[in-house]
Image (cartoon, rainbow, N blue to C red):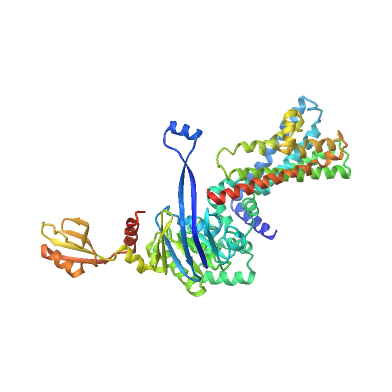
Amino acid sequence: MIELNGICKQFRVARRGAGLSRAVRAFVRRDHQVIHALTDVTFAIPDGQMVGYIGPNGAGKSTTIKVMCGVLTPDSGTCVIDGRVPWLERVAHVQHIGAVFGQRSQLWWDVPVGDSMELIRDIYRVDKADFRARLSELTELLQLGDLLATPARSLSLGQRMRCELAASLLHAPRILFLDEPTIGLDAVSKLAVRGFIKRLNQERGTTVLLTTHDMQDIEALAQRILLIGKGRILLDGGMADLKAHAGTGKTLTFTYAGDSAPLPGHGMTVREQTAGRLTVAVDTDTLNVSQAITQISAQVEVTDIEMASVSAEEMVASLYQAYQI
Amino acid sequence: MRLYFSYFSMHMKSQMQYKGNFVMLFVGQFLVAFAAVISIAFLFARFNQVDGFTFSEVLLCYAVMLMAFTLAETFGRGFDRFPVMIGNGEFDRALVRPRGLIFQVLVSQMDLTRLGRVVQALLVFAYALPTSGVAWTPDKVLTLALMVICGALLFFALFVVYAALSFFTLEGLEFMNILTDGGREFGSYPFSIYGNDILRFLTYVIPLALVQFYPLLYLTGRSTSPLHMFTPVISLLFLFPAYGLWRFGLRKYKSTGS
């Protein structure tokens, strides 16, 4: 159980203008700018839930995760995870959580991955028999096979991420924080990582909180979505809530003959317009698709129509726009 | 302790990956330290004494400081590299591991090539011990051991101070090298030769003289006061402010994260 209540965090950042004169002035007197990294962040995640934590860069995702990992102490507010306050009982707390930071490795660069795993076993004081059982299970699920004998420096990004996941699960944490686990991965690796996370959550009941910029991750994994912007939680709900806020709708692309461009009426927004081609977003609340098609084909001779749903990607983009973050 | 050896073997494996590199660094470390011995020898070829100390006495002094520094550096090098750890986020990783932080920084880096210097310090000892004219009675052996052990701990404390300061700024920390590397270099000679002000500074502020000059007086028979025999132990008081500074820096880090 993760409970955050009214977490606030401010950073003071020294600000300095460009140019020599400003640099000299900054040397004498620093201007400080207060950044509200987190403002009144409140949410609770029950055991076994899988939550997608989204928001643009710099919104406060990593800061929240750092607070929950015990790396950062917030200015105010409470955070209790499985009955412990992370920054007060750091050692006891981190024994029960796992963390993967997509951009940073915990594997030893020059040493075979298997040796890194052994070291992690020692760090977390994992029983030898447990360790062997878990590692062989993880090896099978993540298809680590002969990767264990390879030094981390010779792994591809996808292989490395699979090893990172295994490395952070050796102590069977009840909660797993994933900070951009699929960043930079190819399609196959992404699917493998997603599949694994899903199984982990379903079979072991591990609570998972993942941040990502990849909406397919969210669609595939998250039972619940937290949207953060400028340090505030803006939306807390399922995919359906996200759709409701972002506005559903369809995209229609018409290919038509003739030179005169059609004029889309109420309920349609032009997305792209070139000679002989028009893409519009249809707001299905005010106009249904067949009405839209009728309207356009009344004006020009339509030769082809393509239709697509608004992707999660676009939904989030429009959400960011709607909340001005 | 078991975990320490696990880390140790990891570092071994890492460094053995680059065999040629390892051997060359090992030999290099060994040779670099010899340059210092030779410079002392040249100096004494012209002058018989420095501030009343003979060649073998100075050599003894040098061997102690070299040994103390090398031990501290070989095992506490993680602190030397600590600004890097903060910069690349490795320290955040340490914070999510269920182990002590000082321990984790300590084991984050072990430079085994530095053992080349240990070998060299041992050689200097082998030469200086019999020729120094010191009668090696048990109390003198104890004094020597205290000098080396407390000296190593003191250098280690200086590394901790260095690391703690990098919680506040990552720039301009080179001045700390005056105390660490500089302490070793200047420590080749008894600190008294640098004058009273320096000696006082190294007695009361950064107590390097407590592990070098005063016990050396006892070793060479210039003083018979048991106080001089045990001054190295007193120097360990420096560990407290060093640890305090570390805690203070850590608190600040955890509240700013940068």
Q: Give the percent coordinates (x, y) of residue A62.
A: 47, 56
Residue B136 position (above or below residue A7): above
Question: What is the number of callouts on the image?
Answer: 0
Q: Pinpoint residue B21: horizontal percent, then vertical percent.
A: 60, 47
Which residue is nearer to you in this view: B131 or A194?
A: A194
Q: Which residue lies at the image location 11% right of the left edge and 57% below the top edge?
A: A260
| Left or right position of B40 against A50 | right
The front one of B99 and A283 is A283
From the viewer's perspective, is A312 left or right of A21?
left
Quarter residue B43 falls in: top right
- The picture quadrant where one finds residue B116 is top right
**Viewer-closest of A221 and A189:** A221
Q: Residue at x 80, y 39 (%)?
A: B127
Question: Where does the image place residue A30, in percent across and percent down from the top left?
Answer: 49, 37
Write down the quadrant of residue B180 in the picture.
top right
Q: Position of residue A211 (x, y in %)?
A: 44, 60
* Residue A1 shows up from this direction: yes
Q: Is residue A277 above or below residue B88?
A: below
Taking the view exactly as shown, the residue that stands out farthest to the bottom is A203
Residue closer to the observer: B52 or A218 = A218
Asked whether the viewer can see residue B78, the reply is: no
Quadrant including the C terminus of chain A: bottom left
Q: Residue at x 78, y 43 (%)?
A: B234
